[in-house]
Image (cartoon, coloured by chain):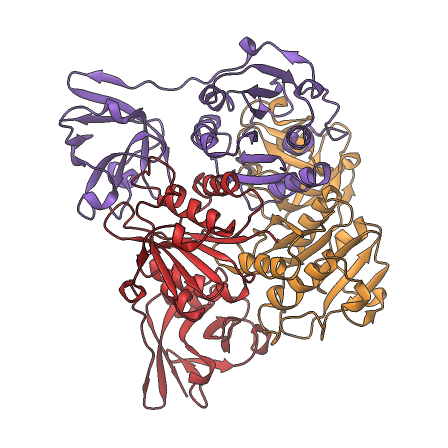
Chain colours: A purple, B red, C orange
Amino acid sequence: MPGTVTFLTDYGLDDEFVGVCHAVIAGIAPSVRVIDLTHGIPRHDVRAGALALRRAVPYAPAGSVHLAVVDPGVGGPRRGIALRCGDRLLVGPDNGLLAPAAERLGGVQEAVDLAGSPWSLQPVSATFHGRDVFAPAAARLAGGAALREAGPPLDPATLVGLDLPVPRREGDALVAHAVAVDAFGNVLLDAVGADLPAGAARVDGRPATAGRTFGDVAPGALLLYVDASGALAVAVNGGSARDALGLAVGDEVRIAP
Amino acid sequence: MPGTVTFLTDYGLDDEFVGVCHAVIAGIAPSVRVIDLTHGIPRHDVRAGALALRRAVPYAPAGSVHLAVVDPGVGGPRRGIALRCGDRLLVGPDNGLLAPAAERLGGVQEAVDLAGSPWSLQPVSATFHGRDVFAPAAARLAGGAALREAGPPLDPATLVGLDLPVPRREGDALVAHAVAVDAFGNVLLDAVGADLPAGAARVDGRPATAGRTFGDVAPGALLLYVDASGALAVAVNGGSARDALGLAVGDEVRIAP
Amino acid sequence: MPGTVTFLTDYGLDDEFVGVCHAVIAGIAPSVRVIDLTHGIPRHDVRAGALALRRAVPYAPAGSVHLAVVDPGVGGPRRGIALRCGDRLLVGPDNGLLAPAAERLGGVQEAVDLAGSPWSLQPVSATFHGRDVFAPAAARLAGGAALREAGPPLDPATLVGLDLPVPRREGDALVAHAVAVDAFGNVLLDAVGADLPAGAARVDGRPATAGRTFGDVAPGALLLYVDASGALAVAVNGGSARDALGLAVGDEVRIAP
């Protein structure tokens, strides 16, 4: 069975960066399959990348290597890392990007520092570690190389974490935060279905209906639902909850009876 | 020979949705190849998706499974279906999306209802049947499973069709409709080359020249041509016919001598 | 070892064009891998496509076939060509698109004219040679067919070249040109690191600092650096050099002490 690399970045698809990383992987490990999770993470938005990766990893094949690069500190003092979480491996910068996915996968059992990795393309550029450090490491690991060969071990306790907002109760209301907005304008919150207040009927003061899917409310109406990743979410049937509520990622969202 | 899945949606590439479907397919059927036809169908535009799929299927390998998801009614009463048309299989919502491609492939010989399919990921979400119902079915079918195992049979006569506009003659003019606009601004019509009126020299009252390719007219001039899908189409050499004519999909376009 | 096709166009991903080319290749050569370098080249911008291809080819696997289509003259008198440069093959229109990559790969040893190629899909459309001529040729070549079977030989000396701007010295200043802007707003110049004037401290009159990577300057400050392709480049740490300097591709950029 060939290995699988999943690949997520903020590179976008207008430049050749993603394609060049694919080319590097194919040259090192020709039988490895690469699955592009997305390259549309907003530029330098480590949190958005981390949450998308966390949502995606449960659906990847057993044994996958998860390559992720949202790396505003490339070439600076931040570390490059590779992690083992059960049968999965994660590769990317040590800036919190991998942390929520690693936690979802059961925590980090083994970590290495990719600085000076024998697998990196030489000379390593200062601005494109995706190509020169991370893609080669993911390719070798997916091809079956041992994690300990990628670089010296790190204490997992020293890995950089990610601060995430925390929803709170205020009386019979839930105050959560918009953590992602998808291309349809659906707004994901940092809460789960069980957090939904009893009798919830308002989102930021506007009438909303709790339901299962978009068609459960009238066209243009607000829907409160548990989205396919398990998150509490807000949608407009046939429209955009982001636009209807004027929300941006990070904003508080008040859900009340 | 590994099976092939072609994949078309309105998910866009900014979220992880397409990548997660790829991951699901790879987990179920590791040797299956997935070809992304496009994920840029305008949101919820079933007609646009249906026509793009119809244009693409003739070029896919024999035996392909065509997975398509433009699904504004996800989680509601619309059915999920898998169809056999000769050596091809089609998988998606029963909302007309698959109908023109099925007709192009010779019509539906066998149909099944995917509600309650034993292949679906459990629990099936209410809003992401691409991941939970359709991608698993496409993966199993491309891996060689029999269509009848996907769910109970349906009478093909009960499948939802797609209403398409019909061009008409008005005297010596042809009144057609814009059915697609590509990224270059070329406008495809719901007519074929044989429909072109003799001596056609005007499009919506503006001078145009019938020709084979863009360079057959001066830069900036209007061209009437048969596009690579066989449709009658309008272009501007080095420009955008959509912008030049102020056209949107669905608009009437009058072609006259 | 299966062959590899790299694929670069200005088709964008909103239409089914790229997917249809993938489908054609898969039908002809099922075991060939296709790597999308990018399909986001600005429409009809042969120079941008040529430079992106030149940057990417050094990273592709040995023996790759490089398929590239930015083709404003499709269906007109421009030739379709396939070239051999050492162990690589290049396929596309003879409009200069392939020339810089061919030179980077050591020059053209063998060239053929694809007009009338026995491999083309029939009938060949006038507007989509990517599907009908170039993708089939790339597929056959990656599958192991001989270049001489693709069409009659051409004298490499007759191939169309690409005019590129040339940077110049003016006293102790360097006057270069913006040749590409990536999705981050970083501006690549037609100069290399060795061209950087001693003590360079200004870009178009604005203070800038020479450094290795983005974090070497304060947030919002201008950085002069050698980018990962070896080009001299200008960035803003956490921002866009294009926006900060008001630059467009082709503009002169003055770097001075």
- Above or below, A211 against B152 in this view is above
Can you say which quadrant of the picture contains the C terminus of chain C?
top right
Q: Report the front residue among B81 and C220.
A: B81
The answer to whether A138 appears left or right of B174 in the picture is: right
x and y percentages locating residue C215 in the rendered image: 60, 23
Residue A38 can be seen in this image: no
- Above or below, C214 against C121 in this view is above
Q: Report the front residue among B127 and C107.
A: B127
x and y percentages locating residue C139 in the rendered image: 68, 59
Q: Report the front residue among B139 and C195.
A: B139
x and y percentages locating residue B73 in the rendered image: 27, 50
Q: How many marks?
A: 0
- Above or below, B181 against A135 in this view is below
The answer to whether C178 appears left or right of A66 in the picture is: right
x and y percentages locating residue A51 in the rendered image: 43, 28
Residue A196 can be seen in this image: yes
- Tell me where residue B136 sits by quadrant: top left
